[in-house]
Image (cartoon, grey):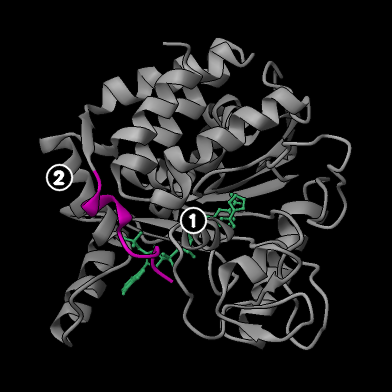
Amino acid sequence: MSAPSDHVSAAVMSTLSLEELTQLLETIFLRHGTSAEVARSLAANCAGAERDGAHSHGVFRIPGYVSTLQSGWVNGQAVPQVEDVASGFVRVDAGNGFAQPALAAARPLLVEKARSAGIAALAIRNSHHFAALWPDVEPFAEEGLVAISVVNSMTCVVPHGADRPLFGTNPIAFAAPQAGAAPIVFDLATSAIAHGDVQIAARNGERLPPGMGVDSLGQPTQDPKAILEGGALLPFGGHKGSALSMMVELLAAALTGGNFSFEFDWDNHPGAKTPWTGQLLIVIDPAKSAGQSFAERSHELVRQMHGVGLKRLPGDRRHLQREKSLKYGIALETPTLEQLQRLAGF
Ligand code: NDP
Ligand code: PYC
């Protein structure tokens, strides 16, 4: 499901460079109690999402990060503890902090293991992931590695065949190098629509396509507010998406030691929005199997897909938007920029 219609185009806009936006977001995080390392990591992630037009996980998320930090639900100063547990396995306890700094702390060891053993896994637990997942995998493909990651979120999805929500929106992201072109990357929620896009549709007064969710009585609805206020989302693709969502719960939570999407209770932390769960990454060095030909083979697959009429690959929209943002700046609605400036204390 693509993001709800581009509300940005009709409004009064301001434009920032990637560096200016990153700096502004870093100031917000620091002002709300994170360490410098955490502020750098989250600001880069969030500004990168906005640059790529990933609006459901760009600056839209900043008030949620701020209210979560203010609620004491997450530790913005957490220092991740990295453990070297086996030749192909790294574990991190994120210390009730954010997942991105935990990944950054474990990344050198993970890459070293993937390059020496051919494959390595990273299990992050006790972590909060409130962002798009593609920024976690894309950099591996940029250095010639194949990466897959899963993260679970918060209970809001009804498993196929059930009548109450249990799963999170549970995305899966994949990245692979491609010769002579940007890596092949996809990143998709296993729910019919991401929770963030439902919030944006509700804010914009838009209806959703059929099949996205149910209301508080379990009846199908296209009203995003009915989904958010006591209703729930459905998995994409019926039993198939539901099985993938179950897999994400198992890999991101059971395998890592993190919480299932239904296991944490943030009721005593009003304002808390970030799921306290786990994340798994698997990184493969294709040089150990297909050698350098893997990237050529990726390119050949893409060439053949275009040959049968394909116009858009996953990631193409983001890359087009990235090019535009880097050329003309990142456009924000002026009231949104003013809100960010207030949060930064300007
Ligand atoms: P979308 O449905 O918008 O897109 C899913 C993937 O399909 C993307 O890679 C997208 O590429 C691609 N795509 C979309 N339309 C087409 C098309 N017509 N042809 C070919 N490819 C296409 O994403 P979701 O709504 O499922 O997820 C949005 C974001 O929400 C993700 O980044 C996800 O990680 C995040 N999320 C995070 C969670 C968390 O717990 N942290 C939980 C749930 C979601 P492109 O990007 O180029 O459009
Ligand atoms: O959009 O579903 C979502 C989501 C959940 C946690 C972060 N994003």
Mark 2 highlights which residue?
Answer: 324
Q: Position of residue 241 (x, y in %)?
A: 61, 78
Question: Does the segment drawn in magenta span residue 72?
Answer: no
Question: From the viewer's perspective, is residue 42 above or below residue 146?
Answer: above
Give the overall secondary structure of the magenta segment: loop
Q: Residue at x 20, y 56 (%)?
A: 179
Q: Residue at x 83, y 76 (%)?
A: 164
Describe residue 284's horizontal placement relative to residue 246 as left or right: left
Q: Nearer the viewer, residue 93 or 207?
A: 207
Q: Earlier in the sequence, mark 2 or mark 1?
A: 1
Q: Nearer the viewer, residue 188 or 23?
A: 23
Question: Does the segment drawn in magenta span residue 8?
Answer: yes
In this picture, which residue range is highlighted in magenta?
1-11
Describe residue 25's horizontal placement relative to residue 162 as left or right: left
Q: Position of residue 263 (x, y in %)?
A: 88, 52
Q: Quadrant of the C terminus?
A: top left
Q: Position of residue 205 (x, y in %)?
A: 46, 64
Question: From the viewer's perspective, is residue 198 above or below residue 268?
Answer: below
Which image quarter: residue 191?
bottom right
Q: Amino acid type of disc 2?
A: Lys
Q: Nearer the viewer, residue 281 or 26?
A: 26
Mark 1 highlights which residue?
Answer: 203
